[in-house]
Image (spheres, coloured by chain):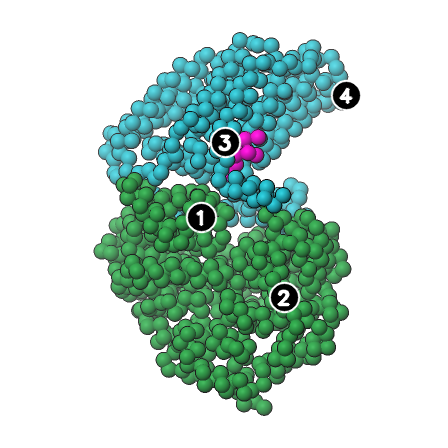
Amino acid sequence: MIHPVAWWAWGVGLATAAAHTTNPLLLVLVVLVAGWAVLERREVGALDAFRPFLFIGLAAVALRVTMAVILGNGVGGSVVIVDLPRLPLPSWLAGLRVGGPVTLESVLAAAVDGMRLAATLACIGAANALASPKRLLRYAPATLYDIGTAIVVALTFAPQLVELAGRVRVARRLRGHTGRGPRELARLVVPVLAGTLERSLELAASMESRGYGRLPVRTGRARWLGSILALVGTAGTCAGLYGLLSPSVGGWLGLPTLVAGVALAAASLVLGARREVRTAYRRDPWRAPEWALALAGAAAAGVFVVGDGSGWAGMALQSTPLAWPELPLLAAAALAVCLSVIALTPVPPRLAAARARTAAAA
Amino acid sequence: MIDFQDVSVAYAGESRPALSGATLHVDEGELVLVVGPTGSGKSTLLRCINGLVPHFSGGLLTGQVLVGGRDTRTHRPRDLADLVGFVVQDPMSGFVTDTVEDEIAYGMEALGVDPLAMRRRVEDALDVLGLADVRDRPLRSLSGGQQQRVAIAAVIAAGPRILVLDEPTSALDPVAAEDVLAALHRLVHDLGMTVVMAEHRLERVVHHADSIILVEDGRVSALLDPAEAMVTSPVHPPVVSLGRLLHWQPLPLSVREARRRASQVRAQLAALPPPGFDDPATSARSAKRHSGSGSVPSGPSDSRPSGTGLASGECVAATTGLTVRRGQVTALTAVDLTFGSGEITAVMGRNGAGKSTLLAALVGELPRQRGRVTVLGLDPAGLEPQARCAAVGLVPQDPDLLLYADSTGAECRSADADFGCDPGTTAALLTRIAGPVPPERHPRDLSEGQRLALALAIVLAGGARVLLLDEPTRGLDYQAKARLVEVLRELAAEGHTVVLATHDVELVAEVAHRVVVLADGEVVTDGPARQVIAGSPAFAPQVAKIMHPIPYLTVDDVCRALTPAS
C-alpha cells in the first residue's frame, strides 16, 4: 500500500498547481492526470470520491457562467454573443447591472475561473479516492486527533449523505412521486438527515465503547499551552497556505506566515505527543514511490507558483484581445512528471486481481 | 462477572421505565441469551452492561451495575473498553476505518496496546474468526456475515472478557449466521469468554445458550435454564412449539435432540397421507396446479401450487433474460421468471446473491443491461411513478425510507394525498394489517412490526397488484411475524402477487407457495416451496429437518396431520 500522506501530497500539489493557472489547456491536463491516477490506482471497493467532486466542480463552472451572463463580471470585450434585455434598476443600485450585452470574453473568463476551481476540487477528490481520509487520520498526531476526527467524519458524512439521498429518492418514487424538483428535494431533507444522524450516533456509540478518547487527564497549564499553540499555529498555517494558494494576495507574503504557523503547530504537536497513549499498528512504509509522488506534487506546485508569479507566457488566459492559449513547456513537463510517477506506484492488489480475471476471461 | 442490583432505567418523556428492578448475576464463561418481544427493553439491558446507558443514551439509572468489579456509574464506556466488547446491531454503521486489519487494530490503538503485541493479537483475531483470507479487503466489499465477524474480531482483539451483541444474526443468511454462531461458540468454549446477546431468531441461537434472560415490558427475569425458560416463554422457536405440541419432557432445543425424540412421530406420520393434502387454503389451487405443469417436476406428495402463473394463464409479472450490472459486478444474469396472481414467491439465496436487485428491477428502478420486465403487460421502468405504484409496490428493507411525516396519522393522510385515494384509505388499511395504532405516535417510535405494517399499508394504498417485500422479518418478533404471515395469506387470497426476498426459512415455510433460489445472480432452483426447502440443508426449516425425509414444513402441518379430524 502506498502511504496515504504521499497520495495527499501529490494531490494537494496538483491542486496548488491548478489554482495558479487560468490556462484551460493546463487545467484540462491537470484533471486528466488526476482522473488517470484514480482510474489506474483506486482500489476496488474504495469510495469513489473523484466523481462527486468533479460534478461539484462542473456545477461551479455552470454557476459562474450563468452569473456572468446575467450579472456580468467586469470583463469587457468586443465580441458580443447576445444582447440580453437590460433590467432597469433604481439609481441607488447603480453598481449593479442585470442583463445587457454578453461578450465572449466575459463568458470565457468566467468559465476558466470556474474550471480552475473544478480542477482544484478534482485533485482533492482524486486524493480522497486514492487514499481514504480515514487512513490519513492514523498519521495525525495525538494533539490534532479531535480536529482530525471531525474532518474525517465530515468527509465521510458527505458521501454517506449522497448514498442515503439516492435511496430515499428511490423510496420517494415508490410512493408515486418523481423525486425531482425543489419541493421534492425539501421532502427528502428530513428522512436523509434523520438517517445520517442515526448512523453517526451508532458510529459514535461504537467508537465510545471501543475506548476512543481514553487520554489520561492532563494538567491544566499544559493543556492551555498546548491548545493556544495549536490554535495560533493552525491559524498561521491556514493563512500562509491561503497566501500561497490565492494569487491575489501575492504568493511571497504567504511563505513566512506559513513557516511560522507550521513551527508553532509543530511545537504544540510535540507537547501533545509527550502524552500520547495511542499506539500504531503497521504503519505504511515510506519508500521510493512515496518520495516520487510527494516530490512530483511539490514540483508541480512549485513550477506553477513560480510561473504564475513571474508571469510566464501562457500561464493565464489572455482574454482581451482573445487569443488561443499557448502551452507553457515547463508547466506541461511538471504535469507529465506527475503523470509518470503514477507508473512507479504498485497497482492495488484487488484491482490487479480483477484485471487479471478480466484478461483471463478475454 | 456481571452483576445487576435492582437496576431501573427511565428515559425522560416516557411514561413507564424501560427497565425496572433488574437483578441478575452472570458468571464467567456463560453464553446468555436475552429473549423478549421488540421494545421490551432488551437493547437497554445490553447497553447497561458497558455503560452506554446512561453515559451515552441519557436517562436515569438507579441501582447498581457492576462489571468485573467496576461500577458503570463511575466508569464510562471507554473506561470499560478493555473489559466489555460491544457489537452494535448493524456492523457497517459501527465501523470506524475502511479495511479489515485497520478495523481490528483500531480498538487496540485507542487502548495503547504495545505494537508488537498488537500485531500478534490482530493475527489471532483474524484466525479465531476465520478472516485471514479477507484481511486486506475494504469493509464495504465484504458480505454481511463477514462484516459481522469483522465487528466481533475488532472487539475481541482488544482482549475483553465479556462480549455483548445486539441481534448479531438477524440480517444474515442461514449459513453466514451459522458461521457467526460457530465463532461465538468457540469464544465461549475455548477462551472462556462471557457472551450476552439478544436475538429474535431463536431457532438459530437457543441451543447454543447456557442460560436465558426473559425480558417483557421492562421486567427482567433471573438467569433461567433454556429448556425451562422455553416452557413458558411467549417467544419460542418452532422446535419448541413442536415439543410443546407433542408434550416432550424435557423440551428439546436443538434439531438433533428433537430428531432423536421424533422417531416414533415420524413413523406415525409416514403412515398418513402426505402433508398438505387436506389443506383447505391450498387444495383448490392444488387441483389447478395438477392440471398445469410446474417448472420443477413435482411429486404427488405436494399440494402447494407450483406457481408458474404462465402455465395456468394468469401471469401478472415476468422477467425475460433479465441481466443487471451493478458497478463491476453482474448482479443478475439472464433471469427468466414469471409470477402468477395469488401466488407467494420467496426469493432466497446468500447475502449478495441478487435478491434485492431482482426486486428493484421488478419495480423498474435499476438500469438493465439486457432483457425485459413486464408487470401487468407493461414495463414498470417506462411508467409514470403514479401509474407504476398502481401496478407494483416495493416495501424496502428499511421501511423507514418510506416514512416522512412526524405522526402516523399525518403519514396516512399524506399517503392518501400521494395516491389520490379517498381520505382514510391508508389508515383503514393500517388498522386492518396491524390493529389499532395510535395516530399521534411518531413513525420512528412505533415498534418494528407496526412500522412495517405502516409501510405496507402505504404501498397497498397505491393499489399495487404486485407486492414486493425486501427482508420483511428483519427485527420482527414472533408475534409480529405471525401477524405478517396472516396478512400475506389474506393478500394472496385476494389475488395479489407477493414476492419476498428473505433469509427467514421459517417465514418461507409458513407462507410461500414457491421458492426461487438465486446464487451469484442466476436462478439455481425454482419450484414448489415444499420440495425446494424440505430437502435443502441450508434452507430447510426446523420442522423439516426434524421430520426429514417426510416433507412437513411447519408445526401447523404436523398438528393438522396428528389431529384426528377425519
Residue B125 position in % (x across, y down) = 35, 50
Q: Secondary structure at mark 3?
A: helix
Q: Residue at x 42, y 84 (%)?
A: B247
Q: Which mark is residue A82?
A: 4
Q: Which of disc 4 and disc 3 is earlier in sequence?
A: 4
Q: Which amino acid, mark 3?
A: Ala
The chain that hosts pointer 1 is: B
Left or right of residue B10, residue A170 in this image: right
Quote the CA–CA distance across marks 3 and 1: 25 Å
Q: Quadrant of residue A32?
A: top right
Chain A, which colour? cyan
Q: Nearer the viewer, residue A141 or A288?
A: A288
Asked if B9 appears above or below B233 in the picture, the reply is above
What residue does disc 2 label? B526
Q: Chain of mark 3?
A: A
Measured in 3D between alpha carbons, the distance from the residue under mark 3 to the one under mark 4, in whole angstroms, is: 40 Å
Q: Indicate the secondary structure of the residue bearing disc 1.
A: helix
Q: Say which of marks 4 and 1 sits in front.
A: 1
**Residue in view at x 50 percent, y 56 percent:** B444
Residue pointed to by mark 3:
A127
Picture coordinates of residue A11 (x, y %)? 50, 27
**Up-down: is B273 above or below A75?**
below
Which chain did the image draw in green?
B
Q: Earlier in the sequence, mark 1 or mark 2?
A: 1
Both labels 3 and 4 in a single chain? yes
Q: Are marks 3 and 2 on the same chain?
A: no
Q: Tell me if mark 2 has few (under 14), some (14-19) or many (20+) residues whose alpha carbon lies within 10 angstroms of its own.
A: many
Q: Quadrant of residue B30?
A: bottom left
